[in-house]
Image (cartoon, rainbow, N blue to C red):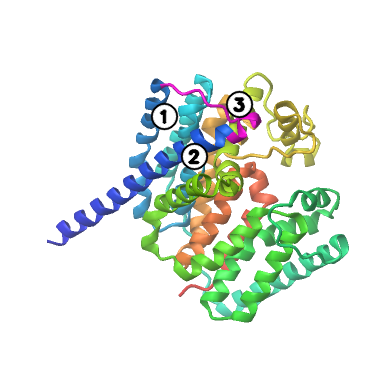
């Protein structure tokens, strides 16, 4: 009898997951064809429909569904991150395959990348670290780190922005242009980046411990960080940290596809009822489709030019020189004719830019290994801490190169903080 109940439970989870993925994909197709392409076609979001491409796009989605549903049974942070990466990156890619004139070689290479990703995730064993037993020491170190984060963010705000505080999401580019001219000292820059990644996790941690003052201080510092450089990721992860603490449970992981479906449905209703497209412009287009468009541009450039081999990353510190200007600026100039734009991207773009075609085999291995180490640092933590960590890291991985994620965007610092957090 217990086995029958277990089988029934698994069956219900699978049905909910497949239903969520299908609804999300259907509504995303409608949003792209009826809103994104007509409104933003001039920026590269083309639409050339054919039944053959549409069927192909569903086939390359369906073959991944068993791999995706298997993640629902895992309770690790890495499984949450991969679920989110799939929903943020691969599924929107299948929508664009249906409508955008991608090359066949790009489509095949992209599919191989994700297959290799899932295969390595399955094959690489779990890594175990010894859990710290001294909660007093852990809390002492965490408090020191928070003090440093607070001091650095306030210093940058006062020194470079005259303590500017703004929550304007529509006009962030002035803040971003200002931030490019700051020329922060290297150590200050690293600490600032780490703070932005770690703070949402600390907000949830302090809320869970009913330490409202500490949670409020970290929230204010995070919003001050948004005011410094206009990063929407910083703003939204802060808001999400608070919302998810209030509503998220482990069982809700299976409805993540339905959440993505709901966001797209609301965007569609906004277009047809309010004749507005704010959600389409700032969420659907920017978060789901722009990275995939950039993937195709990175592929187009580096399939006919030499890879960078990390010469713009850590190798530059030991004397290697890249033959290119900053890669994100290079792509922006060539494909958007916007020198001021930063066309940064991650995952597939990172693989192609640094290793060419071999990157689809090499980079998934590096990412999966990093995620396994992350799991070792987070074993036993509350699901609410895991989910906000997963959201933060998923957005960072989608938009940044691997070693930038590790060193500049706070992955290593986040691993350290998560390892220090006391378990129940």
User: Measuring 63% from the left and 54% from the top, which residue is drawn there?
Assistant: 233
201, 89: nearer the viewer: 89
Residue 46 in magenta stretch: yes
Q: Nearer the viewer, mark 1 or mark 2?
A: 2
How crowded is the residue under tag 1: few (<14 C-alpha within 10 Å), some, or many (20+)? Answer: many
The residue positioned farthest toward the left in the image shown = 1
Is 168 displayed left or right of 243 in the figure? right
Question: In what element is the residue under mark 2?
Answer: helix
Disc 3 target residue: 299
Is 302 displayed left or right of 262 in the figure? right
Is 340 displayed left or right of 259 in the figure? right
Count numbered badges in the picture: 3
Question: In what element is the residue under mark 1?
Answer: helix
Disc 1 target residue: 57
Q: Nearer the viewer, mark 3 or mark 1?
A: 1
Question: In what element is the residue under mark 3?
Answer: helix
**Res. 380 in view:** no
Picture coordinates of residue 81, whole percent (x, y):
49, 51
User: Measuring 77% from the left and 35% from the top, which residue is drawn there?
Assistant: 326
Q: Which mark is residue 31?
A: 2
Span of residues in magenta: 39-50
Picture coordinates of residue 230, whole percent (x, y):
73, 54
Is 95 displayed left or right of 322 in the figure? left
Picture coordinates of residue 174, whole percent (x, y):
80, 50
420, 93: nearer the viewer: 93
């Amino acid at each position: 009898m217990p086995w029958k109940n277990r089988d029934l439970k698994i069956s219900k989870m699978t049905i909910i997951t497949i239903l969520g993925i299908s609804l999300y994909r259907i509504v995303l197709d409608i949003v792209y064809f009826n809103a994104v392409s007509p409104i933003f076609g001039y920026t590269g979001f083309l639409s050339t429909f054919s039944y053959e491409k549409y069927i192909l796009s569903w086939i390359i989605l369906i073959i991944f569904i068993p791999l995706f549903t298997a993640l629902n049974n895992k309770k690790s942070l890495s499984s949450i991150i991969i679920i989110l990466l799939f929903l943020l990156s691969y599924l929107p890619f299948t929508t664009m395959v249906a409508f955008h004139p991608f090359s066949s070689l790009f489509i095949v290479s992209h599919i191989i990348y994700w297959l290799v990703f899932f295969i390595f995730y399955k094959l690489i064993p779990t890594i175990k670290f010894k859990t710290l037993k001294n909660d007093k020491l852990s809390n002492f170190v965490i408090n020191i780190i928070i003090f440093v984060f607070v001091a650095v963010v306030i210093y940058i705000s006062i020194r470079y922005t005259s303590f500017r505080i703004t929550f304007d999401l529509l006009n962030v580019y002035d803040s971003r242009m200002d931030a490019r001219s700051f020329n922060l000292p290297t150590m200050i820059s690293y600490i600032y980046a780490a703070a932005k990644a770690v703070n949402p996790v600390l907000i949830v941690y302090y809320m869970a411990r009913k330490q409202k003052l500490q949670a409020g201080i970290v929230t204010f510092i995070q919003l001050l960080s948004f005011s410094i450089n206009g990063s929407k990721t910083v703003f939204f992860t802060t808001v999400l940290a608070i919302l998810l603490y209030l509503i998220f449970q482990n069982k809700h992981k299976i409805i993540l596809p339905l959440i993505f479906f709901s966001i797209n449905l609301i965007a569609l209703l906004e277009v047809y009822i309010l004749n507005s497209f704010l959600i389409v412009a700032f969420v659907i287009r920017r978060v789901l489709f722009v990275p995939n468009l950039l993937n195709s541009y990175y592929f187009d450039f580096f399939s006919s030019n030499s890879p960078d081999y990390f010469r713009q990353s850590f190798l530059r510190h030991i004397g290697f020189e890249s033959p290119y200007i900053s890669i994100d600026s290079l792509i922006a100039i060539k494909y958007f004719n916007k020198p001021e734009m930063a066309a940064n991207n991650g995952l597939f773009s990172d693989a192609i830019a640094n290793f060419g075609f071999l990157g689809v085999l090499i980079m998934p291995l590096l990412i999966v290994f990093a995620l396994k180490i992350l799991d070792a640092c987070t074993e036993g933590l509350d699901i609410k801490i895991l989910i906000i960590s997963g959201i933060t890291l998923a957005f960072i991985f989608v938009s940044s190169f691997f070693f930038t994620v590790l060193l500049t965007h706070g992955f290593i610092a986040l691993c350290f903080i998560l390892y220090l957090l006391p378990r129940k």
